[in-house]
Amino acid sequence: MERDTIKLELIEWLSKLDDEETIQYLKILKDSQAKGQNWWNDLTENQKKHIEKGLKDIDAGRVKSHEDVKKKYEL
């Protein structure tokens, strides 16, 4: 997929996003990138905990393929 297409999809998705935690996470990511900082340092402990849990799930093989998720949610 071309970069511009992805950017447009993200803009559309973001314009409809109501999840405050995700919005705050994206703001942290944007601000950290603008300052040239490591975004990890700006995350809350709860956000770090969830990311670390996800990484452990990946290591343990508790994952679903992109195709399986698309099929489940009829995307």
Image: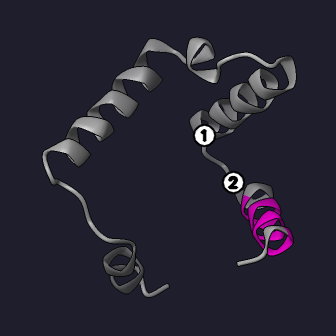
x, y (%) of residue 49? Answer: 35, 22
How many numbered circles are shown? Answer: 2
Res. 22 mark: 1
Res. 10 mark: none
Identify the element where label 1 is drawn.
helix
x, y (%) of residue 15? Answer: 80, 58
Q: Give the CA distance from mark 1 to mark 2.
A: 8 Å
Q: Write down the quadrant of residue 21 in the picture.
A: top right
Residue, disc 2: 17
Of residues 3 and 26, which is closer to you in this image?
3
Badge 2: residue crowd in 10 Å (few <14, some 14–19, many ≥20):
few
Identify the element where label 2 is drawn.
loop
Q: Residue at x 72, y 63 (%)?
A: 13
Q: Circles 1 and 2: CB distance less than 8 Å?
A: yes
x, y (%) of residue 69? Answer: 36, 74
Q: Which region is colored magenta?
A: 4-13
Q: Residue at x 69, y 54 (%)?
A: 17
Question: Of helix, strand and loop, which mostly describes the magenta segment?
Answer: helix
Q: Write down the quadrant of residue 71 in the picture.
A: bottom left
Q: Write down the quadrant of residue 5 in the picture.
A: bottom right
In magenta segment, residue 6: yes
Left-right relation of 44 to 45? right
Q: Residue at x 60, y 40 (%)?
A: 22
In magenta segment, residue 57: no
Q: In the image, what residue type sits under mark 2?
A: Leu
Left-right relation of 56 to 19? left
Q: Residue at x 31, y 40 (%)?
A: 54
Left-right relation of 7 to 37? right
Of residues 63 and 26, which is closer to you in this image?
63
Q: In the image, what residue type sits under mark 1?
A: Thr
Of residues 2 and 53, which is closer to you in this image?
2
